[in-house]
């Protein structure tokens, strides 16, 4: 009797194996301007949703677009639109302002749009010619894969080309650290990275990069923050994207602007 019972149990275990639930893996790659938001949202979302593991990294907006298109990442984070990339679905999750940041030794707090173009095109090479100290200007650029660079180029440079002779720094956090440490330096970065940093956030044509100026379009350097997916996302991915876009408290805490507050709309950023 005991032998028959053990045989029955063994057969039952073979026919009805224990269910093993696999964790859901989500990968987000791209914009370093969007990185602090996606990274913090991923931490919070994973803690609240057992079995959802979210990996977040930078690399630049165009890397994010490419990774989403190839299917290597579920989420492609970007500061720019993705024309010509058929099959990608665009999810706008926030608005971010970008700042022209200056090492405090330059003694500059306001720049005209013309001066900004002159500086980054290499026509103005000393801060005294932009109302500041008698000090050489050190340009800190972003690589061509950077969405931050693309936004800055589109909103500020016009027909002027960015001078490539300066330093090129890959990530937003490193840009800020480099400007803080380098006398006479200037660059451009998402506002989220400038909080409590010992540097100057320059006004443009007398307008500060604050929410009230961005939502009305008075301040020029801003962009929608996009998350691209390869077609319609899975329910888990869609829920995470919605968590980012609808989390007003987290957006405000990290220096982003909820989409609903914009009073102007653009189709090319």
Image (cartoon, rainbow, N blue to C red):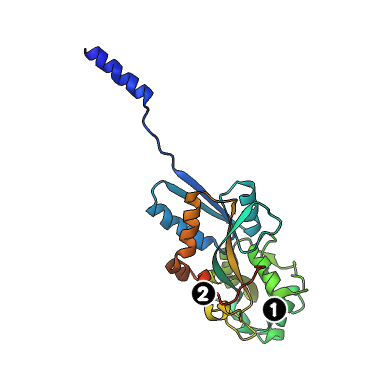
Question: Could you tell me residue 19's position as x and y percent?
Answer: 38, 33
Taking the spot 56% from the left edge, 77% from the top edge, the residue there is 263
Checking the image for residue 116, the label placed there is: 1
In the image, 59 versus 222, the foreground residue is: 222
Q: In whole angstroms, how far apart are the C-alphas of marks 1 and 2?
A: 28 Å
Query: For residue 148, which quarter of the picture?
Result: bottom right
Checking the image for residue 224, the label placed there is: none
Q: Vertical placement of 82 versus 267: above or below?
A: above
Left or right side of 235 for 134: right
How many numbered tags mark residues here? 2
Taking the spot 57% from the left edge, 56% from the top edge, the residue there is 58
In the image, 191 versus 76, the foreground residue is: 76
Q: Which residue is mark 2?
A: 261
Q: Indicate the secondary structure of the residue bearing disc 2.
A: helix
Taking the spot 26% from the left edge, 13% from the top edge, the residue there is 4
Taking the spot 47% from the left edge, 68% from the top edge, the residue there is 251
Q: Sequence order check: which comes first, mark 1 or mark 2?
A: 1
Question: Could you tell me residue 222's position as x and y percent?
Answer: 61, 72
Viewer-side label of 1, 2:
2
Q: Indicate the secondary structure of the residue bearing disc 1.
A: helix
Crowding at mark 1 (Cα within 10 Å: few <14, some 14-19, many 20+):
many
């Amino acid at each position: 009797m005991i032998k028959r019972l053990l045989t029955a149990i063994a057969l039952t275990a073979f026919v009805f194996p224990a269910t093993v639930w696999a964790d859901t893996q989500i990968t987000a790659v791209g914009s370093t301007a969007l990185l602090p938001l996606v990274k913090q949202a991923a931490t919070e979302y994973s803690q609240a949703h057992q079995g959802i593991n979210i990996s977040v990294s930078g690399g630049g907006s165009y890397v994010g677009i490419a990774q989403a298109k190839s299917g290597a990442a579920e989420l492609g984070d970007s500061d720019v639109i993705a024309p010509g990339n058929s099959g990608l679905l665009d999810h706008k999750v926030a608005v971010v302002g970008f700042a022209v940041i200056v090492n405090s030794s330059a003694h500059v707090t306001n720049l005209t749009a013309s001066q900004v173009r002159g500086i980054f095109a290499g026509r103005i090479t000393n801060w005294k010619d932009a109302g500041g100290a008698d000090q050489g200007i050190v340009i800190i650029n972003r690589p061509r894969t950077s969405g931050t660079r693309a936004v800055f180029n589109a909103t500020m440079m016009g027909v002027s080309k960015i001078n490539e002779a300066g330093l090129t720094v890959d990530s937003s956090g490193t840009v800020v650290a480099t400007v803080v440490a380098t006398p006479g330096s200037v660059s451009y970065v998402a506002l989220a990275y400038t909080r409590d940093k010992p540097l100057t956030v320059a006004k443009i044509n007398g307008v500060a990069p604050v929410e009230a100026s961005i939502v009305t379009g008075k301040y020029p350097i801003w962009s929608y923050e996009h998350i691209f997916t390869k077609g319609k996302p899975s329910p888990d991915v869609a829920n995470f994207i919605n968590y980012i876009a609808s989390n007003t408290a987290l957006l405000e805490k990290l220096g982003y602007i909820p989409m609903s507050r914009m009073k102007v709309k653009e189709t090319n950023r």
